[in-house]
Structure formats: structure tokens, C-alpha cells
Amino acid sequence: MKNIKIGLIGLGRIGLIHFNNLKYQIPYAEVVMVADPRHKEQFKGVVVGTAEELINHPEIDAVVICSPTNTHADYIDLCAAARKDIFCEKPHDLSLERVITTLETVKKAGVKLMLGFNRRFDANFKKIHELVNLRKIGEPTILKITSRDPGPPPLSYLKSSGGLFMDMSIHDFDMARFIMGKEVEKVYATAAVFTSDEVAEAGDVDTAVINLTFMDGSMAVIDNSRKASYGYDQRLEIFGSNGMAQADNNKHDSHLLVDQEGSHGALPLDFFMDRYEASYRLEMMAFIEALLKGEGLPVDGHDGLEAMLIAIAAKVSVDEKRPVLLKEIRNTIRIKAL
Ligand SMILES: NC(=O)c1ccc[n+]([C@@H]2O[C@H](COP(=O)([O-])OP(=O)(O)OC[C@H]3O[C@@H](n4cnc5c(N)ncnc54)[C@H](O)[C@@H]3O)[C@@H](O)[C@H]2O)c1
């Protein structure tokens, strides 16, 4: 089988993870060129070029976009024009109109676009998804997702991130759709700043509770914080007519100490780099496999758009202190896009 030749844009926190997986872990993937203004000429034996050189490189089959969010849509458009398949980190872009136009461009060009919702490939959440699909808990009615970071990112990242809902909760919005297998009708969110003045300075929030109501009336509640003092807290519970299923945190080890003061165990893994290490490898393997076999993608541009609509509705809900129908957000795009 021939290798899929890859160009990778952006070698920061997430770009390095994907680079190492593609270069050292994933069969039939070959990194031909990378682009990042912080690196010149060579990076770990791979040629460095500009993003434009990379996208138009005749040997490259697919481009992996890991640069800051505000660059994604431009690179997606250039990739579509160059007929390159695309893996793009979440979110697509911060503008809904821009996302719609890139989706249209990608469709017209006939290229593939996968979004980086890696948590779908995590063993815990994949298992819960499987149990729900097998109807092991009957009809799911309440989903609870806890998703808390160990600490807020730097101010510079926050400023270009699109805010808590678009940057962080978007993973949970995708997870809610993935686990429930249903579309969201209504969003009601409350949010505040508790961790640092920098978050408020960036015009953002760091703590939120988001209620989602699905089309059939079933519900999800998501709680997010940018700062959990005990590590990266990633748990989920789903309740249904015949039972419930839970996914707990992955910890540094599984020891249990019991003494006069109580029971003690290890803390959760530190952050996304260690907690979701395997899921990043598996999602990229799924991307390469889909390209090799010419099959559909497990997470695509439509999933990115749906999660983004929920993120926008959550922001409107906080700003206007009211429940927001997703239909309202969809209608605004239709009006403006026509
Ligand atoms: N799926 C996930 O779990 C996950 C985790 C972290 C970040 N992300 C997403 O990945 C993207 C990058 O986040 P990060 O945390 O790696 O950021 P980062 O700041 O650590 O890295 C960004 C990199 O892109 C480079 N860069 C800047 N402008 C560029 C340009 N115009 N062209 C090419 N490269 C450029 C920077 O030099 C830097 O090396 C964001 O969209 C973020 O939302 C996803």
C-alpha cells in the first residue's frame, strides 16, 4: 500500500503530538513537510516550508492543520483549492459564516475534512458510546459531563481561542452529541470568572454550567472549569430507563491506601497531553485509514459545525441570561449567508 504523504502546519502543543504520532507511530503515514514560523529549514529531519509551499507541494496528499484557530479557515480554503484532504484541529474558525463557506468550498472541491474531536477515540468514552448503542441502559435521558482543566492557558492563547465555549466546552458539546446520538434543541448556560484576572482581561469566563436539551426532551448537563486544583478532571455519567453507565478519571496509578485518616488514591492524569495520548494516536490512525481505504471520516465538518452552533448558543445564553434555541442560531446564518 502506498504511504499517505502529510504536510503539518503548526508545531505547538497539539501540533507536536500529531507530528510525533504521524512520524513515529502510524503506519502508512509519512510527514513530508512542516510549517511553523518558529522553525526554519528542518524540524526533526523534516523539511520546513511556508504553509503555502506545503499546501501546494505536489507530493503531499493531506494537510494536518494545528496552527492557532484564527488561521484554520484560510488554510482549509487553500487546501481545498489545492485538492488536499484535511485534518483540522477544533474549532474550524470563530466565525459561523466563515465555517459555512469553508464547508461549501470543501464540498465543491471534493476533499475530505476531519475535525479534531479526539475524545471520541478515548477508550472510556468509546465504551460508553458502545453501551448506549447496545441499549444497555435503555433509553438515555440524562447525560452528565464533568470537564475541568488543571489551569488556564496563557493570556495570549486565551485572546485568540474564541473563549471557553468555543475553545474548551466544544469538546463536551461534541461528546454530548456523540454519546446521546441526538441533536440539541436548546441551550441554557451560566458562567463566571473565578480563576484569574487574566481571564476577565481576555473578555472570557473560566467556569460554566451548561444545560442542553435534545430534540426528544432528554438532557445533558456539562460543568467546566479552567482550574481544578487536583489535575485534569474528565468524567461522564449517562442515565437511562434501564440503568446508568459511568466513565471515571484515568489516574497516575491505581493504588489504594487506607489508613486512620481515610482512603487515598492517585490523582487524575495531569492534562490533555497525557490523558488523551492514546486518543490522539487513534484519531490520526482513523484519518489515515479513511484516506487509504477511500472511506468516510468518523468525525467531519458537519460535526464541527454542530458543536460550534452549541458553543455560540451557550455564549448568547450567558450574555442574554436566557435559554437559546439552536434554531435561532441556525436562522441567523441562513439569513446572512443568503
Ligand atoms: N484537540 C485538542 O485536544 C486540542 C488541544 C490543544 C489545542 N487544540 C487546538 O489546536 C490549535 C493550536 O493550539 P495549540 O495549543 O497547539 O497552540 P500553540 O500556541 O501551542 O501552538 C500554535 C503553533 O502554531 C504556530 N503558528 C502561529 N501562527 C501560525 C501560522 N500562521 N501558520 C502556521 N503556524 C503558525 C505557532 O508558532 C505555534 O507553534 C488551536 O486551534 C486549538 O484549539 C486542540
Image (cartoon, rainbow, N blue to C red):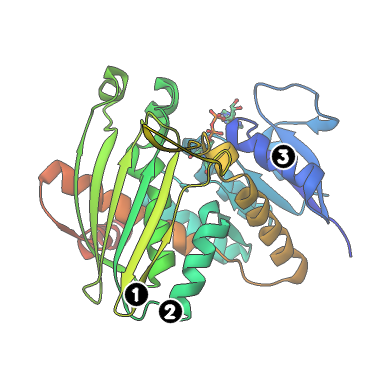
- How many discs mark residues in the rendered view? 3
2 or 3: tag closer to the N-terminus: 3
> What residue is drawn where x is 61% and y is 30%?
12
Instruction: Name the residue at the left extreme.
Output: 321
Number of other residues with Cα within 10 Å of mark 3, as a class: few under 14, some 14 to 19, many 20 or more: many
User: Where is the N terminus found, in terms of image quarters?
Assistant: bottom right
Q: Nearer the viewer, residue 24 or 9?
A: 24
> Looking at the picture, which amino acid does disc 3 mark?
Phe
Kindly report the distance in space between the C-alpha atoms of the residues bearing marks 2 and 3: 38 Å
2 or 1: tag closer to the N-terminus: 2
Mark whose residue sits in front, 1 or 3: 1
Task: Please provide percent x and percent y for residue 28.
Answer: 83, 56
Kindly report the distance in space between the C-alpha atoms of the residues bearing marks 2 and 1: 7 Å
Kindly report the distance in space between the C-alpha atoms of the residues bearing marks 1 and 3: 41 Å
State whether residue 276 appears in this view: yes
| Quadrant of the rendered image containing residue 216 | bottom left
Q: Under tag 1, what secondary structure?
A: strand
User: Where is the C terminus found, in terms of image quarters?
Assistant: bottom left
> What residue is drawn where x is 33% and y is 80%?
242
Q: Under tag 3, what secondary structure?
A: helix
Task: Please provide percent x and percent y for residue 253.
Answer: 58, 40
Instruction: Name the residue at the right extreme.
Output: 1
Q: Is mark 2 within 8 Å of ligand 1?
A: no
State whether residue 95 appears in this view: no
* Residue identifier under label 1: 243
* Residue identifier under label 3: 19
Mark whose residue sits in front, 2 or 3: 2
Q: Nearer the viewer, residue 256 or 213?
A: 256
Locate ligand 1 by image quadrant: top right
